[in-house]
Image (spheres, grey):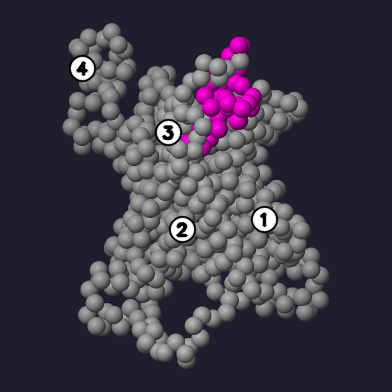
Amino acid sequence: MNIAQQEPSSIAPRRPRLSPRQRRRYMRFALWAIVVLAIVAVAMLAPSISPHNPDKLFSNGLTPSGMPLGPSKEFPLGTDQFGRDELSRLLWGGRPALLISGLASVFSSIVGIVLGTAAGYFGGWVDTVISRFVNILMSFPLTLFAVAIVLIVSPSILNLIVIIAVIYWTYTARLVRAEVLTLREQDFVAAAHALGCSPWRLMVKHLMPNVFDTVLVRAVLTMAQVFLLESGLSYLGVGVQPPTPDWGLMIAQSQNYYGSDPGLVIYPGLAIVITVIAVTQLGESYRALKRRT
Amino acid sequence: MLRHLVKRFLWSLFDLLIIVTITFILTYLLPGDPARTIAGPHATLADVLRIRRQLGLDAPLYVQYGRYLWNLVHLNLGTSIEFGTPVLSDILAKFPATALLAATGVIWELILGLPLGVFSAIRRGGVLDQISSTLSMAAIAMPQFWVGIILLFVLAFKFHLFPLGGYGTPVLWYAFLPGLTLGIGGAAYYQQLIRSRVLEVLPQQYIATARAKGLSERQVLLRHVMPQVLTTLITQIGMDAGYFMAGVVVVETVFGWPGIGLQAWTAIQALDVPLVIGTVLFGAFWIVLANFVVDSIYGLLDPRIRLR
């Protein structure tokens, strides 16, 4: 690697031309990256771009009979059943789920890569203990387990992040372990070992960089799955608590108004679907990009 | 083969023991005093202490753990705080509905996922492939409760084709929409899984051989491609069945389907911890069982596994 970099640039072509297929993959990746960035940007800028305070109950936000309003100049997407501005709530509503899924995915990836590498590299009883524990955690019914723990520790955003990370690191660890098992047999690991590299250094400097792409893709897909899980928990009433605007919670609270005002259920649902598709496709397109064939 | 089975079985028992220990720790960590909850707001301190002694909550931790295990071995999952009935009988009473829903969900997964996956692989890049791949991308991203609400509204409320949730006769009519809601995400996953599996198998040499010896495409598909796909499929179906049996809280809640998931959700509202934890344990049991069965079948189908 270092030798190649020291060669004069006139000998080696500076950048190989991309094949049409590879160029299409870059385009696809860029497209989804832009969509995801846009969604994150909207969520982060919600305080400055939303037309109203999302929690404010407008006295003119309901019809005389107490029903939600349709779209108007003041409320572009109408109001919800409490007379709050629907557009503002939608702009704010992605924040809790994005925060929870983003951080839970980061934490679970860190734990997963460390324990997965250790299990794959050391083998023996370390592997047995970690793999057994992964198996056991995977045997809990996911939603029900999360619901039961939330019942015990009370549903704050921090608690949700920790609980979800505790469940999801297993998927990363399993993937990493499998990959480290094949990497371990390769010559560069034997060479590093022969040079007197400590196990810790070997794992951090030689094994982890090689599984990084796998973990990155897995982390992005985890984020999409956690996003769905979070919206489900909020729908069940054990996730984000009212009056915080959250897409899953908005659907739960408005479902009885579906007949008269379907938008209150459709809009937050579409927001969830678009976000999850964008995040999933970001991961998939990155994986395709790295395939190099 | 027998050795493989016994080994797997013992590991499953070990897993269950750890799972039980984790749920015990969870129960023990719980805030609030069950004795106080049972005694009610007007109870005297003496009453609370008496109930606490009755429940064995005054014993040291290891004694409580021992009793907990002893009770579990005797299929005693504790007593529901809300109903005062044994948790296991509450769960078993609601379980047939959940099992029916789980079966309907798996059937929907297969009806939708299997043909779409196979055909989009055979005509890769074709119209059907593009449509079904796009649909499955969207279906995987849809929250189940949202799909359920929309199906319920459009097909049941607007067009009166199906009942508005709940349970009744003919039962398949009531199970249609919840099953579809449950199966849609899985069907999308099956479409992707089977498509990629078939695409893996098609370029293999023995497929070319089968074609060269004059088999029709249909025969190649049924006799040489499908057996390969089936191994993958059985694993997945087994796991799905396990997960669905473990309780499908969201779908049951949306449709008011009287299964163990809805019961657990109601129990959460009532802070009925024994019932919630009991359902978690019951669900984990099904998943461990499904794992064991899938592994065993896999060992039967593929000798390489059991020799490891």
The residue lying toward the viewer, choosing from B198 and B120, is: B120
Q: Mostly what secondary structure, the magenta segment?
A: loop
The residue tagged with tag 3: helix, strand or loop?
A: loop
Q: In the rendered view, tell whether residue A144 sits above or below residue A11.
A: above
Q: Residue at x 52, y 47 (%)?
A: A39
Could you say whether the residue bearing mark 2 is in a helix, strand or loop? helix
Mark count: 4
Q: Amino acid at mark 2?
A: Arg
Which residue ends up furthest to the bottom in the rendered image?
A11
Is circle 3 on the same chain as circle 2?
A: yes
Q: Going 54% across and 46% down the picture, which residue do you hit?
A: A275
Determine which residue is flagged by label 1. Answer: B133
Labels 1 and 3 touching (C-beta < 8 A): no
At label 1, counting other C-alpha atoms closer than 10 Å, the crowd grade (few under 14, some 14-19, many 20 or more) is: many
At 57% from the left and 41% from the top, the residue drawn is A271
Decide which of tag 1 and tag 4 comes sooner along the chain: 4
Check the image and report above or below for B303 versus B280: below
Q: Is residue A195 visible?
A: yes
Please name whichever residue, A193 or A141, is drawn nearer the observer in this view of the structure: A193
The x, y position of residue B14, in whole percent, is: 35, 50
Residue type, mark 3 in image: Val
Magenta stretch: includes residue A66: yes
Q: Check contact, mark 1 vs mark 2: CB within 8 A.
A: no
Which disc, if any, is residue B49?
Answer: 4
- Report how far apart the C-alphas of labels 1 and 3 lie in the structure: 33 Å
Query: Which residue is at a point 32% across and 42% down the rendered structure image?
Result: B22
Q: Nearer the viewer, mark 1 or mark 4?
A: 1
